[in-house]
């Protein structure tokens, strides 16, 4: 487990060791959707907004 | 020693589905995964792209997936799903056309290119109808049209406010589906699982909060699902169906399927089936080349 900080609300977020670059997660405190933008060291940013051609 | 299979994993955001697939791939001893993020990918046209035996496509953007698949295939790489499948499934008009070519039952669909002809088509079909963007997903911008007044206003809004592809009017007859539709999962020539998606709203996408439950895979459901997947070009596909008194109707076929809400309700290890299929395809591709 590694601790990072939510870029939106500053809450502590625990990351599993197998966290991938590009992975999505929700901040338990503020509910923001976040993306792991880097591993080693871990970096977090708000996830991109849905685009018109997103889907299945 | 046997050489490892190299699999390119085309993705943008890593959602629960991609995470489950990566975990499954990494649990296999004979596989090496190359992560290909479509946000940092560049191609030089005419030059080989990657040293991989196959690419599995898991992009969230349809347009990126479609174009990347084309370029991977042009450089001789097998893709799952194929460019052809992505182009058919990514466009509801092409999907309906492919289903019709294989005589697979679907709701009545009409296509029109102007407001006036679309209104005429709707009046002939009778209300209610659903207007859908030909390219789009997660139930976004679908309109249920119950009468002529709403037909006129939605068509006008689409013509004036929509981007150019909103003026390809895809009009589908509304099907009374008693609060639920069916999503079946096809991998290769097998229907491996199915779920019901229930909602109080007529849009029953799980992305819109529909509740899922297991749907037994009968011979009839399996047969129509596999045939619909084949009509779309085959591979790893999710087929959306309506159950009506007259039998099943296929609504659409999805080529980058979401399945995270379907594993525990069906008890089927969907990522395991997907990975087996990808590795089989990659293995065959590798041996055909050598
Ligand atoms: N003709 C119809 N009659 C009744 N309900 C419909 C009809 N078309 C769509 N729906 C409902 O709306 C939902 C979304 O429709 P559809 O799957 O065509 O759109 P989508 O945006 O492509 O969604 P998806 O994420 O499945 O690709 C369906 O699950 C279904 O419940």
Image (cartoon, rainbow, N blue to C red):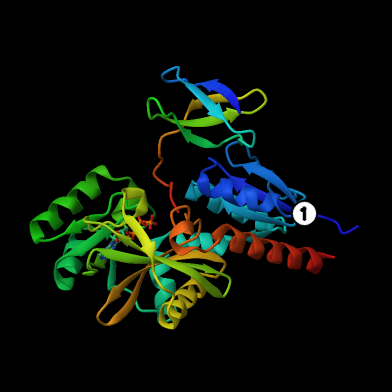
Nearer to us in this view, B284 or B42: B284
Q: Residue at x 55, y 61 (%)?
A: B269
Residue B132 seen in render: yes
**Pointer 1 local density, CA inside 10 Å: few below 14, some 14–19, many at least 20:** few
- Percent across and percent down for residue B193 are 48, 68
- Percent across and percent down for residue A56 are 45, 54
B70 sits to left or right of B279:
left
Q: Within the displayed image, which quadrant is ligand 1 positioned in?
A: bottom left
Residue B287's place in the image compared with B44, above or below, is: below
Q: Chain of mark 1?
A: B
Residue B49 seen in render: no
Q: Residue at x 69, y 65 (%)?
A: B281
The quarter of the rendered structure image containing the N terminus of chain B is: bottom right
- Percent across and percent down for residue A50 are 40, 39
B24 sits to left or right of B141:
right
The quarter of the rendered structure image containing the C terminus of chain B is: bottom right
The secondary element bearing badge 1 is classed as loop
Image quadrant assignment for residue B246: bottom left
Q: Residue at x 59, y 33 (%)?
A: A16
Nearer to us in this view, B163 or B33: B33
The residue beneath circle 1 is B29
- Percent across and percent down for residue B251 are 35, 68
């Amino acid at each position: 487990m590694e601790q990072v900080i939510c870029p939106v609300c500053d809450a502590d977020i625990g990351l599993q060791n197998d966290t991938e670059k590009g992975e999505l997660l929700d901040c338990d405190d503020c509910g923001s959707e976040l993306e792991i933008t880097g591993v080693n060291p871990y970096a977090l940013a708000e996830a991109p907004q849905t685009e018109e051609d997103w889907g299945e | 020693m046997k050489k490892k299979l190299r699999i390119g994993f085309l993705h943008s955001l890593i959602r629960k589905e991609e995470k489950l697939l990566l975990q499954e791939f990494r649990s296999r001893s004979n596989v090496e995964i190359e992560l290909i993020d479509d946000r940092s990918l560049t191609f030089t046209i005419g030059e080989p792209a990657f040293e991989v035996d196959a690419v599995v496509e898991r992009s969230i953007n349809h347009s990126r997936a479609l174009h990347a698949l084309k370029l991977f295939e042009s450089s001789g790489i097998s893709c799952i799903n194929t460019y052809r499948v992505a182009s058919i499934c990514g466009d509801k008009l092409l999907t309906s056309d492919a289903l019709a070519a294989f005589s697979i039952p679907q709701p009545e669909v009409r296509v029109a290119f102007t407001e006036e002809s679309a209104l005429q088509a709707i009046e002939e079909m009778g209300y209610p109808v659903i207007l859908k963007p030909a390219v789009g997903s997660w139930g976004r911008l679908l309109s249920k049209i119950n009468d002529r007044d709403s037909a006129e206003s939605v068509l006008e809004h689409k013509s004036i406010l929509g981007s150019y592809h909103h003026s390809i009017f895809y009009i589908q007859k509304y099907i009374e589906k008693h609060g639920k539709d069916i999503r079946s999962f096809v991998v290769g020539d097998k229907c491996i699982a199915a779920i019901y998606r229930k909602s109080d709203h007529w849009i029953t996408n799980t992305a819109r909060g529909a509740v899922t439950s297991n749907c037994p895979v009968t011979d009839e459901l399996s047969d129509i699902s596999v045939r619909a997947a084949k009509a779309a070009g085959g591979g790893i596909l999710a087929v959306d169906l309506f159950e009506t008194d007259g039998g099943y109707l296929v609504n659409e076929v999805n080529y980058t399927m979401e399945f995270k809400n379907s594993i525990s309700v069906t008890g089927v290890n969907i990522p395991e089936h997907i990975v087996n299929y990808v590795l089989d395809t990659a293995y065959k591709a590798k041996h055909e080349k050598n």
